[in-house]
Image (cartoon, grey):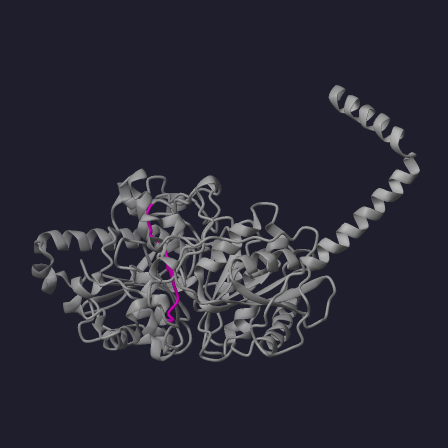
Amino acid sequence: MKYKDEKYEKAERGSTRILPKTVLLILLCGLSFYLGGLYCGKNKLQVNDVAKAGSSLDVDNSPQAKSVSFPECSSDYQDYTPCTDPRKWKKYGTHRLTFMERHCPPVFDRKQCLVPPPNGYKSPIRWPKSKNECWYRNVPYDWINKQKSNQHWLKKEGEKFIFPGGGTMFPNGVSAYVDLMQDLIPEMKDGTIRTAIDSGCGVASWGGDLLDRGILTVSLAPRDNHEAQVQFALERGIPAILGIISTQRLPFPSNSFDMAHCSRCLIPWTEFGGVYLLEIHRILRPGGFWVLSGPPVNYENRWKGWDTTVEEQRSNYEKLQDLLSSMCFKLYAKKDDIAVWQKSPDNTCYNKLSNDPDAYPPKCDDSLEPDSAWYTPLRPCVVVPSPKLRKTDLESTPKWPERLHSTPERVSDVPGGNGGLFKRDSSKWKTRAKHYKKLLPAIGSDKIRNVMDMNTAYGGLAAALVDDPLWVMNVVSSYAANTLPVVFDRGLIGTYHDWCEAFSTYPRTYDLLHVDGLFTSESQRCEMKYVMLEMDRILRPNGYAIIRESSYFANTIASVAKGLRWSCRKEQTESESENEKLLVCQKKLWYSSETK
């Protein structure tokens, strides 16, 4: 305070000698007003239209909006996945493949550059043709083609990869494999089974085939150096996410998926106290099905090809059967290479865990929240479904498509949630989706296939777009109210995520990103530029973003978007609210300056 007072006194004495205080104040105010008007006039942000629909508004600079620009990342970052970066794997342990889990860089090590596309990148082939082929240059990795050529996962023909629908356990094609599975599980045919997860998905041919049968699948595979399985899946237009069952729970709530599948995914199900299978048990809905093909199923006829002995495989199968029985699974059907177990549809089976202190695996104690699934360690215990939930089992859940609009029982677990609010939310998003289609006619066309709702509540946008040729990854913030169980109960798919970190996907994997108030609700937690850099990373060139935000944030977002080389326009919401605005943006296709 001493130095500040002395400085103030000196300034005051100096100004008194030149002009009276009142005159000086008037002059300073006038000069400030003039310069402010001059500055604002010169720096008005210009934004291009991305579609010839609707009446756009000017995007003006606000006091908090600053001009920004971002350099290009080097070309060796074209497949950069910040939280699963093979460059960093040596820093982490190999036990249970821990190095393949999420390990996000600290703030000081985050990349603030634009991830370039591969040299020769083209706009992706449109759905449904994309299910069977993609441009080689968009996913220029030959490892699977060379290593799995005899299994017909994919093959390179000219400038394209072709996906014949082969796989390790389905040499006759994925459709024949799923046909056999449907014979074993009739619930796959009548709308009972709607959501599924495929662990160790390969190039997601199983999930792609199920789409034609009305079953929505999350295909799951870890990041690796060469295979790019998840990137192939998303390039084809099939839902997929980077992930591995290792030491952390998968980012899904309990009792969510109707079916889980593993086709020779080589997960050691019975090791480490059975934690991997216990995690499948947690995320599987009561009455849901677990399907396994490959070792040790059909060991009697297959053991010679597995470089093992019949005795070893028999022992492995018996261990697996014992473990499944201990966590209340029953063998449902078995034929050839496929075995199906069903999770108990009621809680009576779990009474033995409460009554027997020596039961193994034991029942999880009440301190472990069943839906806690963001950096939550796996534990070798059974998550018993809550007895108060009587309508979440597969048999009680309405069949698809009725379940999409039926009020889920778990909506009452959301703070303030109830049936009336759920219905109003559904109605609201029907209106909003209709408005979005006017502003962005590409929605509903073959230009948009992979969609992400970055901070959904009940999956309302996905429900409103369900009849369009697209799918939606519904993301619920790990810091928001837990609404993701409601999303799954409706027959939709989604994941937990913290947007202060990178999402578990490859670059250029989504055609449309939708944001509803994310920056308003979470701007205090991390800088906006990092969230938008991540949006740019996962958005395909020529892809779109619809950003619904408060008027306060809209101009700042537009300024950052310009630095990302996006074209944006501001639009009115369907209600023409002055407190909320829409930004409709399109990412431009550009190539690395290193390749020019």
Image: magenta residue range:
237-246
What count of labels does the image hold? 0
Q: Is residue 309 left or right of residue 348?
A: left
Residue 312, position in %: x, y? 11, 51
Q: Which quadrant does the N terminus fall into?
A: top right
In which quadrant of the rendered view does residue 61 lie? bottom right
Q: Is residue 88 visible?
A: yes
Residue 480, position in %: x, y? 57, 52
Residue at 23% from the left image edge and 53% from the top image edge: 320
When the figure is inspected, residue 253 is found, relative to residue 435, above or below; the finding is: above
Residue at 43% from the left image edge and 56% from the top image edge: 347
What secondary structure characterizes most of the magenta part? loop
Residue in front for this viewpoint, 44 or 334: 44
Residue 583, position in %: x, y? 61, 66
Residue 27, position in %: x, y? 86, 43
Q: Is residue 388 visible?
A: no
